[in-house]
Image: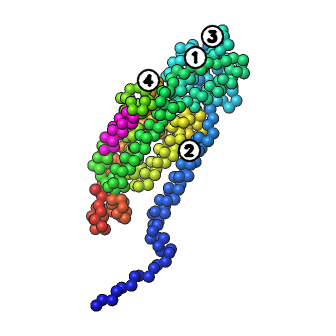
Amino acid sequence: MTQPTSPPPSAGFLAEVKDAVTVRAALLLVGVLALQLAFVTSYIGAFHQPKPNEIPIAVAAPARPLAEQSAQQLADLPGKPLDPHAVQDEAAATAEVENRDADGALVIDPAGPTDRLLVASGAGASLSQALEQIVGRVEQARGRAVRVVDVAPAAAGDARGLSAFYLVIGWCVGGYLCAAILAISAGARPANTHRAFIRLGALLLYSIAAGLLGTVIAGPVLGALPGGIMALWGLGTLVVFAVGAITLAFQGVAGVVGIGLAILLVVVFGNPSAGGAYPYPLLPPFWRAIGPALPPGAGTYAARSITYFEGNAAAGPMLVLAAWAVLGSAVTVACAVVRKGRPGAAVGSGLPDGAPDGEGAAAGGTTAR
C-alpha cells in the first residue's frame, strides 16, 4: 500500500510572484504604461488650449488696392491668427473656399456698412467659429458689421461637422484590429510569403466590406454624411487597408509588440492630430505638422472634401493613404521573405519566435500554421 505523498513545500511569496508575472509580462506592462502616458499627453497636449494660427483666408474688394490693404491689416493681427491674401473678386474668393484653398473669405463692400464673411462649417464648426470671432472683432473695431455666409454647411445630421472624423476613426480601429487578429491567430510574425499574401488578401476583403458598411451607416442609415456612396466607400476601403497593412508591417518587424506600435502611430499620434474636433489651424505646431501625414488626418480631410466640397483637395490625402498602404504591404512581404524557412512558433506556445514548427509540436502540440 502506497503512502500518500505530501504536497511540495511552498517556495515563498516572491517565487509565486515570479511564476505569476514573468519578465516578459512585466516588460509588456511597462510598455503598456508608456503607451497610456503617451495617450494622455498627446490628447491633452493637442486639445487643452486650441489657438488659431495662420488660418488661410481670402480677401476680396471691388478695388484691388483696398483688398490688399485689408489683407495686410488682418496679417498684422497680434499672434498671427490669420494668413490672409488678396484675390480678384468675390467669385475668386468663393472658389477658393469651395476648392479648400482657403478656410474662409472676407468680401468687402465699401459702398455699405456691412461686409460678408464666407465660411465652410463642413470643414469643422470650430474653425468657422474661430474665423467668425476673429474677423468679427476686427470689423467691429473698424466700425463695420459682418454677415456670415456658410458656403459649405454641415448637414443637419452632422453635428459640428464631426461625423467624417468619427467615421474615419471607426475605419482605423477596424483596420488595426483586423490585422492584429490575422497575425496573432497563427503566429506573431508571418512565417512565409504565402501567409503574408493571404493575410493581405483577407485584409483587403475586410476593408472593402468595412468601407461599404461604414459609408452606408453614416450616409443613408443615419443621414449624417450627404453625397455619393462610391467615393466614400473607396476612401473607407483605402483607410482600413492602409491602417491594417501598417499593423501587419509592425508585427512583422516587432512581433506582438507591433500591435502597440500601430496603436501608438494611429491612435496616440494620429487621432488627436487628425483635425477632427479642432482642424489643423487650431492645433499646436507638433500635431498640426504630423496630422496630414498620418492615416486619421488624411482620411478625415479627404472624407470632408468628398462630402462637402465635391472631392476638391482630396487627391493629396488619398495619395498619403495609398503610400501607407503600399509601404505597409511591402514591409509585411519583406519580413516574410527574410524569415523564409524559419516559420516561428505560434503565439502562446512559450517558444521564441525563431523556434521551428517541429519544436512547437514537441513542446506541446501547438504549431504555427
Residue carrying label 4? 310
Instruction: Label 4: state its secondary structure.
Output: loop
Which of the two residues, 121 or 284, is positioned nearer the viewer here? Answer: 121
Q: Closer to the observer: label 2 or label 3?
A: 2
Q: Secondary structure at mark 1?
A: loop
The answer to whether residue 270 is above or below residue 89 is below
| Secondary structure under the numbered disc 2 in the rendered image | helix
Badge 1 or badge 4: first in the primary sequence:
1
Q: Nearer the viewer, mark 4 or mark 3?
A: 4
Disc with the residue nearer the chain's start (1 vs 2): 2
Q: Residues within 10 Å of mark 1 (few under 14, many from 20)?
A: many
Q: Residue 362, position in %: x, y? A: 28, 68
Task: Write the residue at 47% across / 74% down.
Answer: 15
Badge 3 vs badge 1, beta-carbon distance below 8 Å: no
Q: Please indicate whether residue 136 sits to the left or right of residue 342 in the image.
A: right
Q: Main secondary structure of the magenta part?
A: helix
